[in-house]
Amino acid sequence: MLRTHNLGELNIHNLNEQVTLSGWVQKTRDLGGMTFIDLRDRYGITQLAFNLEIEKELCLRARKLGREYVIQVAGKVIERSSKNKNIPTGEIEIQVEILTILNSSKTPPFTIESETDGGDELRMKYRYLDIRRKPVRENLILRHRVAASTRHYLDKQGFIEVETPYLIKSTPEGARDFVVPSRMNPQQFYALPQSPQTFKQLLMVGGIDKYYQIVKCFRDEDLRSDRQPEFTQIDCEMSFIDQEEILNTFEGLTRHLLKEVKGVELKKFPRITYDAAMQNYGSDKPDIRFDMKFIDLTKTCQGFGFDVFDKSDLVIGINVKGCAEFSRKKIDKLVDFVKSPQVGSTGLIYCKYNDDNSSKSSVDKFFDEKQRDFWAEKASCNSGDLLLIMSGEVNRTRKSLSALRLHLAEELKLRNPDEFAPLWVVDFPLLEWDEESERFHAMHHPFTSPKKEDIKKLDSHPSEVRANAYDLVLNGNEIGGGSIRIHDKELQKLMFKHLGFSDEEAQNQFGFLMEAFEYGAPPHGGVAFGFDRLCAILGGSESIRDFIAFPKNNSGRDIMIDSPSNIDSSQLDELNIKLKE
Amino acid sequence: MLRTHNLGELNIHNLNEQVTLSGWVQKTRDLGGMTFIDLRDRYGITQLAFNLEIEKELCLRARKLGREYVIQVAGKVIERSSKNKNIPTGEIEIQVEILTILNSSKTPPFTIESETDGGDELRMKYRYLDIRRKPVRENLILRHRVAASTRHYLDKQGFIEVETPYLIKSTPEGARDFVVPSRMNPQQFYALPQSPQTFKQLLMVGGIDKYYQIVKCFRDEDLRSDRQPEFTQIDCEMSFIDQEEILNTFEGLTRHLLKEVKGVELKKFPRITYDAAMQNYGSDKPDIRFDMKFIDLTKTCQGFGFDVFDKSDLVIGINVKGCAEFSRKKIDKLVDFVKSPQVGSTGLIYCKYNDDNSSKSSVDKFFDEKQRDFWAEKASCNSGDLLLIMSGEVNRTRKSLSALRLHLAEELKLRNPDEFAPLWVVDFPLLEWDEESERFHAMHHPFTSPKKEDIKKLDSHPSEVRANAYDLVLNGNEIGGGSIRIHDKELQKLMFKHLGFSDEEAQNQFGFLMEAFEYGAPPHGGVAFGFDRLCAILGGSESIRDFIAFPKNNSGRDIMIDSPSNIDSSQLDELNIKLKE
């Protein structure tokens, strides 16, 4: 037996017990006649004590131990003279009698402490050392707890976890597939799933009326920061339900997770339509931990000779509470921000409402005090508030003001990671126009059902057709999304037609699903949560990479194992493929 | 709301309630003035009643419903006149008031009943219909329960489920990898994991001292029946443990699963060494639900002028209890069996111990009554027993007699699927000789530690070196296996050398692991369970395919979605590969 206890559990109640412990040397301190070692494992740190006078040889050996050596000790639990109230084991130490070195260690390339001196690349290369650090370890444990709580909740609701296959069929729709050459079926390829979408729908046709799976998915996209080629989904589907039941079920799941994992009790989630979200926040995933809703000033602002406003489709503002005292420099920085390439706007108008009830804007030439007070009334600005206004083409202006809104909230520290503000965004458009291919794409996916009352607009006003589709947004991040699916073959055919699929293409790619729909498909719908993102938000972080045990970098490389890599030509031969010169 | 209740929950306590139900039409029966429909969902069957006299139009519509139509009904729960005590809902029926057809169905290609007329291929093609059948559905639900129970047990023991990556690095050691071309890293490939072996070891180096994962693994092997290119493992690893603790932990898991899922209480699992298993059963995965241990008769049988025995390295027998009355024909069939290509033996000697205390063997010419009685004594044969003897080269003879032993047990119905007989096989050899490559291979894998006391034999008698490796066997199937790993870089190097790796190859393939071992790797070991097989055995079946939602056939094809398939040449271009002509 290599240990009788872990390093987080001994305390004053164990006094005088003989124990055996194992772990990593975190730190060695020599204080005159004593040597103290902080021994670390997953559970905590326990102090070891060596007395130079009493056990000279043992103490000298202890002094030679390097950082991250793996040792085993046997000894007695004694009370510390100077106690550390910050850790559970802080009242005791071990009077060591036997010391065994289980493994030595080279000096690690960065310090294994909560705050480390290791850069990102170095920590990725030695990820196994990074995982020894408490924050990374805690992230992985949090992830485990979120997964376990998810399963508990869904199991209790009668959901069945069903594993769907990883070696499936490539479909050109959507993002790029990773493919896998088949040796046994020459010249043919499997694809790795971008999601188990069709399989979960087939499970519904198969009568498994409540399905879930925590499952890896794959997308071969150019990686922006914080995107991974493989990622994890909580994938769910239900039959014989309407949208209301789905929203309630997964609102329940989210509430359960927040309660179990963070101890936070959430109220009923607000719901807004996609249109309202765009109007009020310029985003389909608004962060509502803070207010700053958009105020439409188009009519109020036009016709005063200010060309910029007069030529705009939309003039909107946000009320930045209590920020009238922003300096000229600070406001200039905001202007720089909106003009930066990431936002791409041309400018920003401000109006300060001073404590003496006067106001001052950057367009006083065109708008007198009275007009500015009229703005204040519309935007509920009081003394001390700052009104920021942007204008231009509708979607662009909304997008820019949304970016500014988030930027300000960040600066004003309104995005508290310990506060959780979920909401449902519903009634998404069914289709969105793709400039590049010059055709409509499914905004969610081709299996999403249109709202019954909008089907008649499919030909005349396709962009106005709303879908039975919904997103769950948490703190400005889309953490889940889903829809009520089409379960009728004719409607599915119609959808494929509107998405520009020929009959042959539709048959080729989704023939099996269309055929399944002929054998009594039930009404069904579902949702998928981005599990990495969900864990990150629950962990109070915006970066998913910190919540993945072995992440890849922005070139899709695992720099620890040095993958991807070259393979033998014999392997290529067997797979009937060649490298392109 | 599409249903107020599912189809398995209404009973006599719900009398007179107004309910709404949805499901599939299983069967329609017209009995004079009444029409009855069995409506089915995942939870059961509820009978719907339509009265031609009272609700003519409704009843006529009901009569037109085809099998597998999806319908919704509203009506009142009433007591049945003729009750069905075999199902929970058998005392009630629904007096239907409203009938809505949610979806129609073509006539399914096979009957959706517990016993179906569909062949294997047809059922695979329409797997979504097959899943509607109770036995298949129950298998998937069993699998879910086994997974959930596994997680409950391991979570309680402090294990953390950590997701390891699917896009990893190809290694020529072991079975063939599936590979994935990287678009972003031209000419390079990822591999899909054959197991998360190295990652779980890195997690141990990272201090996650109890890891598990229920995870998909991939092997591109030629598929024998009942092998799948993708399969699922319960993968576990622990640090600071010895073999005894691992065996106890996973014996505990197995006991827990049998209790939770099957209601079976198991006693402490027997343990035997690999050598003893081979001697006693000729197999490293003996089925011990029945006895028929091998009896060594080599010395007893040699020197009597019977050439076959005299020239053999080994003469062994099994006592087939109570089968002395086997007819000549029956014994000839056994001889045919051992001579069949799958066994490949040359013959079989029998000796019947009759009820009148006489005996009769096929070699009476060489062995008189006294000799035969001596055999009986050695083999504990009593009156009525049948002794079957085989001889020849050691390993071959054991293998043949093992096949005969299982064959007889099958015939005598000694392999009861409701009985569960687990055992541990320990002390596996470290290395096994591979005829083809003319070198030693790791019997388990290259990370398995040799027994300390055997290391000195690595050079002189490599085949005698035993490993700290163990298998868990259940009903003649290996359901799990594992080992204590090497955690010392020098020993790992030595192992790679003995496995014929050059320093460069070892560095190239496992450099990251060897490097990790330099930074304080703890002693560790683990186990992996074949999850598909485990579910099959718990479900009383030998076929894993029945316990996989969407299995592939023996050519690795998913015939439902018709995968693998051809992909666009533009896709190949992007991936920098070409098809070989």
Image (tube, coloured by chain):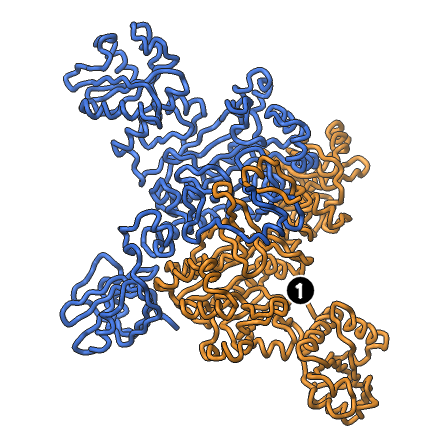
Chain colours: A blue, B orange
Q: Quadrant of residue B407?
A: bottom right
Amino acid at the residue labelled 1: Pro
Q: Is residue B169 left or right of residue A18?
A: right
Indicate the position of residue B102 as horizontal and vertical percent values: 66, 31
Q: Is A326 situated above or below A33? A: above
Q: Is residue A382 left or right of residue B361?
A: left
Q: Is residue B147 left or right of residue A298?
A: right
- What residue is drawn where x is 56% and y is 22%? A439
Indicate the position of residue A515 as horizontal and vertical percent values: 69, 36
Indicate the position of residue B288 as horizontal and vertical percent values: 63, 73
State whether residue A268 appears in this view: no
Q: Is A354 situated above or below B85? A: above
Q: Nearer the viewer, residue B321 or A434?
A: A434
- What residue is drawn where x is 52% and y is 58%? B234
Q: Nearer the viewer, residue B418 or B530?
A: B530
Indicate the position of residue B259 as horizontal and vertical percent values: 55, 63
Question: Which residue in the protein does label 1 denote?
Answer: B417
